[in-house]
Structures are given as structure tokens and as C-alpha cells.
Image (cartoon, rainbow, N blue to C red):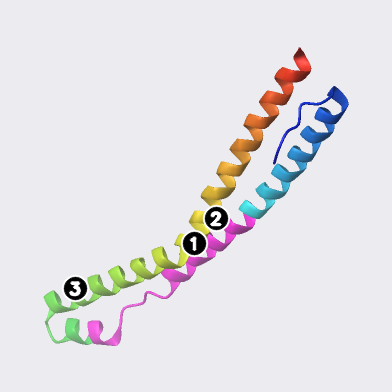
Amino acid sequence: MTLTLDNPKSVKLQVKNINLIQKQLRAIKKEVSLTIKEINQQATQTAPDSLISVGLDLLGKRKWAGQLRQSTRRAIQSDKISLRQPYMDVKDYIDQVILEGDKIKLKAEQYLAE
């Protein structure tokens, strides 16, 4: 996104284009957020107690069963973070671009006010 302060009519058109780009970016950001939400849901749904953990509980080895469940939860959390990190990066980048668009629009408003 660039802004050329050449004449008021052109600047107004450029602002409209920036608004359109920002609207498209917000739509993409919604899709990315939904993907992140799906990753989070899949991670929580794939975490049933393992048979080994249940077996250890039945045999009275509760400490080992607890440690096994904890390590399973940590592994799932680690996988979830690594799966969603690229999407979080894209989401942050979209926010930065939208912010830059807002800064450019402010400059355009200042120009048009003069």
C-alpha cells in the first residue's frame, strides 16, 4: 500500500483502495483465526487417557499413571503450539499491514484537510 499525494481526487481513490485491501485482509484474518480454533479443538479432542495410563491406575501405580498423563498433555500442547505458530505469524503480519494502512489513511486525511 502506497499513497501518492498528488491531487484530492486521486487521494480519495487511493483511500478507497486501501479500505478495500484492509477489508480483504480482515476476511483472511478471520479464516486464519478459524484455522487456529480448529487446531486448538483437535488438540483437546485427541487427548483421551491411554490404555497404559488406565492400566497403571488399576495396578495401583497412580504416580506413574499421573506422570504418563502429564507427559501426554505436554506433548499434545507442544504439537498444538507448533501447528498453530505459522498461522499466528500470518495473523500478526496481517495486523501490521492493517495498521500501516491506517497510518497511510491518516496522512491522506491530513492532506485532504489542508
Q: Is residue 52 left or right of residue 76?
A: left
Q: Check disc 3 and report the residue beneath it.
A: 66
Residues drawn in magenta = 30-54
Q: Is residue 32 left or right of residue 16?
A: left
Percent position of residue 113, x then y: 76, 14
Q: Is residue 19 above or below residue 43?
A: above
Q: Is residue 72 above or below residue 22?
A: below
Q: Is residue 41 magenta?
A: yes
Q: Is residue 75 above or below residue 81?
A: below
Q: Is residue 107 left or right of residue 46?
A: right
Percent position of residue 12, x then y: 82, 29
Which sits in the foreground, 38 or 84? 84
Which amino acid does the dot numbered 1 rest on? Pro
Which amino acid does the dot numbered 2 rest on? Val
Quadrant housing residue 78 = bottom left
Q: What distance separates the C-alpha of mark 2 from that of mark 3?
A: 37 Å
Please report contact status of discs 2 and 1: CB closer than 8 Å, yes or no: yes
Residue at the (12%, 81%) spot, across then down: 61
Mark 2: give few (<14), some (14-19) or many (20+) Cα within 10 Å.
Answer: some
Please give the label number shown on residue 86.
1
Percent position of residue 7, x then y: 84, 24
Which sits in the foreground, 3 or 67? 3
Q: Secondary structure at mark 3?
A: helix
For the view shown, which residue lies furthest in the right direction? 9
- Front disc: 3 or 1: 1
Image quadrant containing the N terminus: top right
Quadrant housing residue 104 = top right
Residue at the (74%, 19%) spot, across then down: 111
Which amino acid does the dot numbered 3 rest on? Gly
Q: Is residue 49 left or right of residue 18?
A: left
